Image (cartoon, rainbow, N blue to C red):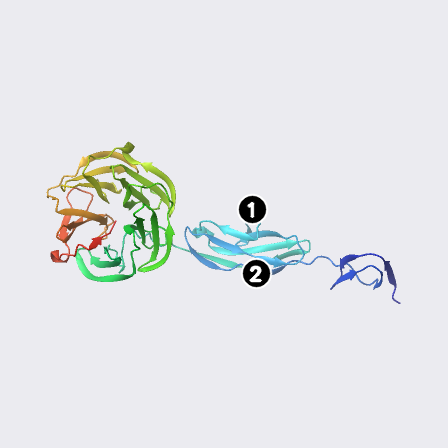
Amino acid sequence: MKSFIHIRKINIVMKVTKTIVVLTLGTLLMSSRATFAQSEPPIIETQPESQTVATGSAATFSVSASGVEPFTYQWFFDGTEISGATDSSLVIAAATFDDAGDYIAGVSNDGGTEFSQAATLTVTEAPAAQTFLDFNGDGKADLLWVHADGRIAAWLMDGTNYLGNISLPHRAPPGWKMAGQADFDQDGKIDFLWQHANGSLRAWLMDGTNLLSTVNLPRRSVGGWRVMGLNDFNGDGSTDILWQHGNGRVAVWLMNGTHLLEGIVLNNGKSLTAGWKIAGLVDVDGDGDNDILWQHGGGRLAVWILDGTTVERAEHYKFSGKTSSSWRITGSSDLNGDGENDLIWRHSNGYVALWFMNGTLEPEAAHVRKGQAVAESWKLRNR
């Protein structure tokens, strides 16, 4: 025989075995066989997903659940509890090969613990940072040209051998000049740096000849300053920016990608006398670090030997050959794939020549395309 509980004048919500029963004001008869249910374990709604990242890149695993809260979380790596990993998401800021493996999340409440499916993290070798323009992937720098009307083209080079040319599907933005090329987003591919007439900087993040996106660099008071080169001056793996003011002073922006970390004035603000301008970055003393090469309006060369951002000494660059005011250094890049920046020269009549640098004062010189002249409306922009 069934017995009943007589409940009068209450208004509550109770969870019973299968359903939620709402008792309203008034009289309700409920079977005494109904029982209060214990909480059940959470139900995993969103599983963490397997992924592949390069060394140094971030990886994030996430899980979500439904059921009776509150929830607590615990992540496991290859079956071992990860200390402090007690959020619904697990972030690995800079993955290493030791981080490769299976990750599982445990989600708990008063009713028990439910475990997610395993998500596998695969870690691959990060792509080697590309330090020069190489559109055809032969390990040697190509020459980049920008026309006065904004067209951009490249000579595909094998050392001094001209292999052909390509046109990029983008034009220089009005009012901007190409300031250099480097891998700003560290994806292993060279990006373009532009400088506006007002001093502002913008990076084109590239995939070969394809423009992926643009990023404006930090805006600082840079009136009178011009970008003269790109180089990793502090050895942290990020490209830094070399500046020269109209009065000759030299400074470096130490960067982390496109973010400015610190600005440093070189040589206590002292520069060479009037008529000298930074021409390129090359390793003159063979220590593996690029030095600052200067060229005078009359053609003479000088060099600042660097240790990081410290100018150790300044000296005239003397070698057995001769220079003249008709030849100007237009940029530097590794043109023969030996790991050394080489110098790109252009004559006033449009000829192009190369100096292959070897850490000594005796470079090897060669003309490009048998001395064929290029119209003045095209400017070489390798930096």
In front: 102, or 189?
189
In front: 9, or 318?
9
What residue lies at 46% left-to-right and 49% top-to-bottom? 93
- State whether residue 282 is above or below residue 373: above
Whichever of callouts 2 and 1 sits on the residue coming sooner in the sequence is 2
- List x then y, in percent, for residue 368: 15, 55
Q: Which residue is mark 1?
A: 84
Q: Is residue 217 visible?
A: yes
- Residue placed furthest toward the bottom: 1
What residue lies at 17% left-to-right and 58% top-to-bottom? 161
- List x then y, in percent, for residue 302: 18, 38
Q: Residues within 10 Å of mark 1 (few under 14, many from 20)?
A: few
Figure quadrant of residue 261: top left
Q: Which residue is mark 2?
A: 46
Q: Residues within 10 Å of mark 2 (few under 14, many from 20)?
A: few
In front: 183, or 85?
183
- Left or right position of 118 against 33: left
What residue lies at 66% left-to-right and 58% top-to-bottom? 67
- Left or right position of 52 against 381: right
Q: Considering the numbered disc 2 on the image, is that residue within a helix, a strand or a loop? A: strand
- State whether residue 360 is above or below residue 99: above
Q: Considering the numbered disc 1 on the image, is that residue within a helix, a strand or a loop? A: loop
What residue lies at 85% left-to-right and 57% top-to-bottom? 9
- List x then y, in percent, for residue 149: 24, 57
Q: Is residue 234 visible?
A: no
Q: Nearer the viewer, mark 2 or mark 1?
A: 2
CB within 8 Å, label 2 to label 1: no
In front: 134, or 177?
177
CA–CA distance in space, label 2 to label 1: 21 Å
- Left or right position of 110 against 44: right
The N terminus sits in image quarter:
bottom right
Mark 1: amino acid: Gly
